[in-house]
Amino acid sequence: LEVSSDPRITTALLWNSGVLPGGKSLGPKVSRDDLNKLKVPLAYVIGGPKDIAAKNAEDDYVAIKELPVFLASSDVGHGGTFGQKNGGAFGPVGVAWLKWQLKGDKDAAKLFLGDPPGLAADKAWSV
């Protein structure tokens, strides 16, 4: 999030993360107010209610008013599925987001667009 305001950045994908309440941060210095200053589409991928960062990501999602934002949650906890082959269930979501955002891939975009978005068809995800 902190570098997403750099004009060279065209999208951001956040894994198991979000702004801490009150803008407190152990790392990047980003407040919830800073979110609406960003100019790039954002995607949050979180590990469901057991993910310690889920509430922060959900609060970010509600706070963002001025840019496209996508939130996907799968009940796998804060560690996500990164330790699984090819990143597990999180891997294809990230790849599709980047293919859509960076390459304009219309097939990849189908996971994130529509009412409901394509990813919603997978019962392991809530969007």
Image (cartoon, helix red, strand yellow):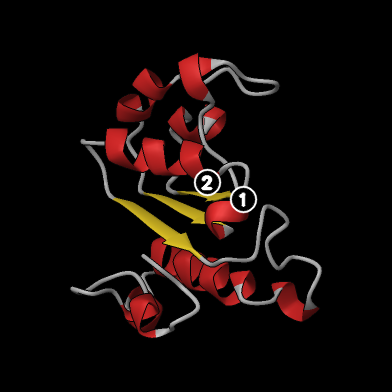
> Amino acid type of disc 2?
Ala
Task: Tell me if residue 122 comes above or below residue 81 in the rendering.
Answer: below
Question: Quick check: can you spot residue 9?
Answer: no
Graded by Cα atoms within 10 Å as few (under 14), some (14 to 19) or many (20 or more), the crowding at tag 2 reads many
Task: Tell me if residue 81 comes above or below residue 18 in the rendering.
Answer: below
Q: Disc 1 versus disc 2: distance between alpha carbons? A: 5 Å
Q: Which mark is residue 15?
A: none
Task: Tell me if residue 67 comes above or below residue 103 in the rendering.
Answer: above
123 with respect to 76 (left or right): left
Q: Are marks 1 and 2 in contact (CB under 8 Å)?
A: yes
Task: Tell me if residue 12 comes above or below residue 22 in the rendering.
Answer: below
The residue singled out by tag 2 in the image is 54
59 with respect to 29 (left or right): left
Q: Determine the image quadrant of residue 114.
A: bottom left
Percent coordinates x, y for residue 100 in the rendering: 40, 69
Q: Determine the image quadrant of residue 80.
A: bottom right
Considering every residue shown, the one lying at the far left of the view is 115
> Amino acid type of disc 1?
Asp
Q: Which mark is residue 51?
A: 1
Q: Nearer the viewer, residue 88 or 39?
A: 88
Graded by Cα atoms within 10 Å as few (under 14), some (14 to 19) or many (20 or more), the crowding at tag 1 reads many
Q: Secondary structure at mark 2?
A: helix
Going 61% across and 69% down the picture, which residue do you hit? 90
Going 36% across and 31% down the picture, which residue do you hit? 38
Considering every residue shown, the one lying at the far front of the view is 50
Going 49% across and 36% down the picture, which residue do you hit? 56
Q: Nearer the viewer, residue 106 or 61?
A: 61
Going 56% across and 71% down the picture, which residue do you hit? 95
